[in-house]
Amino acid sequence: AAAGQRLLQPEAPASSERRGRAGSALRWFTTVVLCAAFLGMGTSAAILGPTFQDLARNVNRNISSLSEIFVGRALGYLCGSVIGGVLFDCMNHFLLLGMSLSATTAGLYLIPFCKTAVVLVIVMSAISVSFGILDTGGNVLILALWGDRGAPHMQALHFSFALGAFLAPLLAKLAWGTTAPAGNHTEPGWHPGALNSSSEAHARSLFGVPDDMNLVWAYASIGTYILVVSVFLVAPFFKKNSRQTKSTSTAPGSRRAKYHKTLLCLLFVFFFFYVGAEVTYGSYIFSFATTHVGMEESQAAGLNSVFWGTFAACRGLAIFFARYLQPGAMIVLSNVGSLVSCLFLVLFDKSPLCLWMASAVYGASMATTFPSGVSWMEQYTTLNGKSTAFILVGAALGLMAIPALSGILQGQYPSLPLVLYTCLGSTVFTTVLFPVMYKFAIFPLDHKHEGNINCEGQEMSSSSGPRGRK
């Protein structure tokens, strides 16, 4: 049984005020530690970008020939989400999350010492499995701790991830200064055979000390931070271990909508298109701005920063907005903002000014959709480990499928802004899909309300005598 589920149970009337304060303090402590864990997860996931050249040099490979590392990460995240969903329903939440963070720490310590591409991909995939477990477990545990009051805390959790992704390049390039040499592997004429002699020297060595020790310090500092967080995350397990009881789907406070499975499938599709559009725009806006609009590379890089900067900033502001706005209202506002910005992008795809403004609005509009979607679903049906893992798998599939399809189509039709068409189509689909989800979510409530009205009508008819009956 999860200790987090136990924290949801109300205190008995005879419980002391001191015990109530201790339970509240434990909830806040767990929430802060989870946010710290998501901060580390965001940093660990984003550190690959600024250090990719250094890792490629480590394994004597070209950057273009290391693309399998992204496939391995995506598959690892998928497996981790499924594993986390299963394990969260049968073992302690805190212990499982602590173990996943410890595995992440071990992987981060090993990455700079990998000397072959196969080993590097395996280690990256193993870390992504831990990410999938942590992502599934963090969302479930926040909902278990706070219930209907979890919207601000859910926003804080995902803001921590965005903040970590923002800090990763600063840590890699400014704090430790990891840089590739002048003759790095990004040169077009470079090919793997150019370093055959060096490859033969390391053929029998799977691990070795890298040439740039700053790479070691960058990954080791993140790994040490995550190790410290894992210690704090496991602490509640030992505190609550002696008083745990088994939780079930019929536990007090749980709810199940009449169309529970239908809602999960709809949210699966919703996150598939939402995450796919988000990653597609963030991944291709740089190349689109340089090739289609004719921007300089420095301006295109600034455009990419504007998108992710407004994305992270609005996730931070959403922590406070979630106290006054319902998750459904935030989703509607996000969908409207995304739809308007995508329409302007498509209509004025050649305008640099429109591209700057619409990118900022698009990033701000997409920031709160994912955490708001999880919080919105919890209002109508309880999410356990398996159901949360199911919707996260939808998000992971969208992350892989939609950007890949957009890239293929854009390559075949370079004169058309197919990246923008993809984002607009996905936004239209999610905007139309959410009212359908809402109708399925409230149907049991409407049906129950209608039943109460019918019962009241029958009572009034029976009390009015035989003339009141049809």
Image: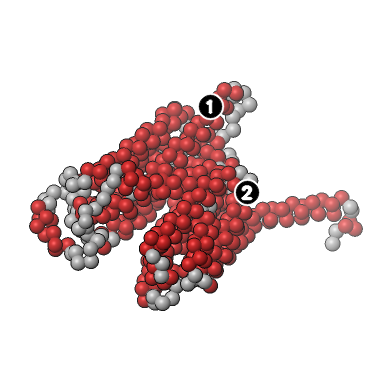
Quadrant of residue 283 within the rendered picture: bottom left
Residue 178 x, y percent position in the rendering: 27, 48
Residue topped by disc 1: 22
Which is more foreground, mark 1 or mark 2?
A: 2
**Residue under the image location 52 percent in, 38 percent down:** 145
**Mark 2 surroundings within 10 Å by alpha-carbon count, few (fewer than 14), some (14 through 19), many (20 or more):** few
Residue at 49 percent across and 37 percent down: it is 31
Q: CA distance from mark 1 to mark 2?
A: 29 Å
SS at circle 2:
loop
| Front-lying residue, 133 or 450 | 133
Residue 323: name its quadrant: top right
Frontmost residue, 379 versus 261: 379
Dot placed on the residue nearer the N-terminal end, 1 or 2: 1
Q: For this view, does 272 lie left or right of residue 462?
A: left
Check disc 2 and give the amino acid type: Leu
Residue situated in front as seen by the camera: 265 or 468:
265
Q: Secondary structure at mark 1?
A: helix
Q: Is 373 placed above or below 288 here?
A: above
Task: Examine the rendered structure and indicate whether residue 341 appears above or below residue 239.
Answer: below
Image coordinates for residue 166, horizontal then vertical, percent: 41, 48
Q: Which residue is mark 2?
A: 325
Left or right of residue 166, residue 256 in this image: right
**Residue situated in front as seen by the camera: 69 or 261:** 69
Location of the C terminus (image quadrant): bottom right
- Residue 415 position (above or below residue 359): below
How many discs appear? 2
> Is residue 432 in view from this perspective?
yes
The picture places residue 314, in percent across and down from the top left corner, at 53, 50
The kind of residue on which mark 1 rests is: Ala
Q: Residue at x 14, y 63 (%)?
A: 193
Tell me what residue is drawn at x 55 percent, y 24 percent. 19
